[in-house]
Image: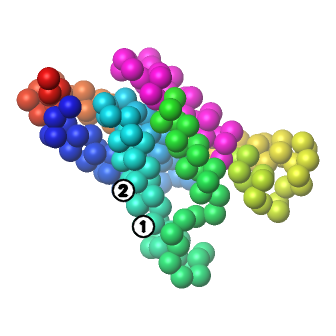
Amino acid sequence: MSKKSITIITAFIILAALSRLLPHATNFTPIGAIALFGAAYFSDKKWALIVPLSALWISDLLLNNIMYSSFYDGFAWLSSGFIYTYGAFAMVVVLGYYLLKKVTAGRVLGGAVGASVLFYIISNFGVWVSSPMYPMTAEGLISCYVAAIPFFHYTLAGNILYSAVLFGAYEWVKLRYPAAIMVES
């Protein structure tokens, strides 16, 4: 993989992560799309995890310390429930490793849907485990998942839209500027 290619993939991921700073509906973000995109296009799988996770963390730092600073005492390095959020994100990268070995529109759409479901299950389990809002019972877990249903469609829509934009733009760049996206022999 060429250095230009790595730079372009990284730039796409950083731009998508920074789009989280723009006004948007709750959960309408590029998080799942970033994880899938990195998994699909970085040939070195460690970078497929490191670059998207770093972009997510940097965008979280900016969000937590600029937009949501009133919710924290001092500088916020990590948000509450980060283990579940970042764990879900890492699982989406793994999903992308296997599903997107060959990039097609159907696989990208399937990945976006799968990313949304994985994130919903894992992150809301984290809410149930770490929040006093729900009792530590099966009914409490079900209540937590039910309460999160109104947010799921935004996650799904964000993953689908941002996946279409990231994958579509990258494929366009590959067609328009093939010398920029070369695989080294």
**Label 2 with label 1: CB-CB less than 8 Å:** yes
Badge 2 is on which residue?
Answer: 18
The residue located at (59%, 81%) in the rendering is: 73
Q: Position of residue 52 (x, y in %)?
A: 40, 46
The residue located at (82%, 62%) in the rendering is: 132
Badge 1 is on which residue?
Answer: 62
Left or right relative to 45: residue 135 = right
Left or right relative to 109: residue 144 = right
Left or right relative to 24: residue 153 = right
The answer to whether residue 176 is visible is no
Ranked by sequence position, the earlier of labels 2 and 1 is: 2
Dominant secondary-structure state across the stretch colored magenta: helix
Above or below for 104 versus 72: above
Q: Name which residue type carries label 1.
A: Leu
The answer to whether residue 25 is visible is yes
Q: Name which residue type carries label 2.
A: Leu
Inter-mark Cα distance, 2 to 1 = 9 Å
- Which range is magenta? 96-123
Callout 1: few (<14), some (14-19), or many (20+) C-alpha neighbours within 10 Å?
some
Callout 2: few (<14), some (14-19), or many (20+) C-alpha neighbours within 10 Å?
some
Q: Examine the structure image and report whether residue 92 is included in the region drawn in magenta.
A: no
**Mark 2: which secondary structure?**
helix
Q: Examine the structure image and report whether residue 114 is included in the region drawn in magenta.
A: yes
Quadrant where the C terminus sits is top left
**Mark 1: which secondary structure?**
helix
